Image (tube, grey):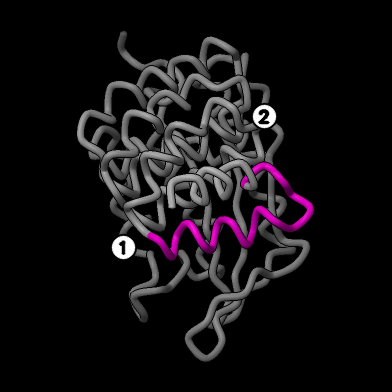
Amino acid sequence: MTTHTERLVRQLDDSTGPSYDARAELIGIGSDTVPAVIDGLPSLGGFGQLTAIEVFEEVADPRCGPALIALLGSDDCTVREWAATALASLKIDGAVEPVRRAHRACLERATPPDWSEPVGIRWALTELGARSPVVPPLTARLRATAADDAPGWPSAHFAEIIDDLADHAQVILCSQFWRVDAGRAYSVSGTGLDWGLDWTAPWEHLVEESRTWSLPETSEAPADDNIFVAPTWIDRTDLHPER
């Protein structure tokens, strides 16, 4: 069985098709595959390591924790991001400080905070209880409560949310609109908004720029009872954490 498992691990790198079957089989075997996947990680390329992370998440065996922490130092930004989010989703003990270091490394590399890696790492820190996003009272009150799986805020209140967040020194990074139909959410094509802010500017300037760039866009934003907006925003401490 060990030989077969090792062969499956090697196939995780083959994006032409075998990796998907190998992934499914490894997940089906369960926790017995974890040591072999861990041992095989250094020999896998980026695609194989991402697939291995998916295996770890599905199997949910905490023995993968040290391997995921090691992947936070990968040269591949997507591997680093997925490792961080997997550590959070699996609630791995001891993950907070390594993920914090990964966040600091993003800042040191001057990675724009609206890129996928820092967004994923901040989500991981939030899930691990090491980050508390600031949600002003009005924004919190306007959040959709009609259904547990509502994706965000009613789009008709988007302009209010933009102002409320800016009033509380929060900078919106981007947003996406969703249509809810029969209990399911669907992305509204062509409505993703990315402000394109200059992240080297002073924080106070970013706050006001976020407000002024955002407001004109809301005039074309869809607004009806079934459309919701999901903005992503950050606090000053996300760019300037205490060291």
Q: N-terminal of the two: label 1 or label 2?
A: 1
Q: Which residue is mark 2?
A: 197
Q: What is the quadrant of residue 98 in the picture?
A: top left
Q: What is the quadrant of residue 165 in the picture?
A: top left
Q: Residue at x 74, y 63 (%)?
A: 220
In the image, residue 240 lies at what x, y percent?
Answer: 41, 16
Q: Which residue is mark 1?
A: 141
Q: Is residue 21 left or right of residue 146?
A: right
In the image, residue 233 lies at what x, y percent?
Answer: 48, 41
In the image, residue 175 lies at what x, y percent?
Answer: 60, 52
- Give the amino acid type for the residue marked by disc 1 in the picture: Arg
Q: Is residue 25 magenta?
A: yes
Q: Is residue 102 left or right of residue 74?
A: left
Q: Residue at x 31, y 8 (%)?
A: 243
Q: Is residue 233 left or right of residue 242?
A: right
Label 1 and label 2: CA atoms lie apart by: 27 Å
Any mark on residue 230, and which? Answer: none
Position of residue 240 relative to residue 216, above or below, is above
176 or 101, nearer to the observer: 101
In the image, residue 208 lies at what x, y percent?
Answer: 56, 31
Q: Residue at x 70, y 56 (%)?
A: 18
- Give the amino acid type for the residue marked by disc 2 in the picture: Leu
The magenta segment: 12-29
Q: Residue at x 65, y 69 (%)?
A: 187
Q: Is residue 49 left or right of residue 18?
A: left
Per the image, label 2 sits on a secondary structure element best described as loop
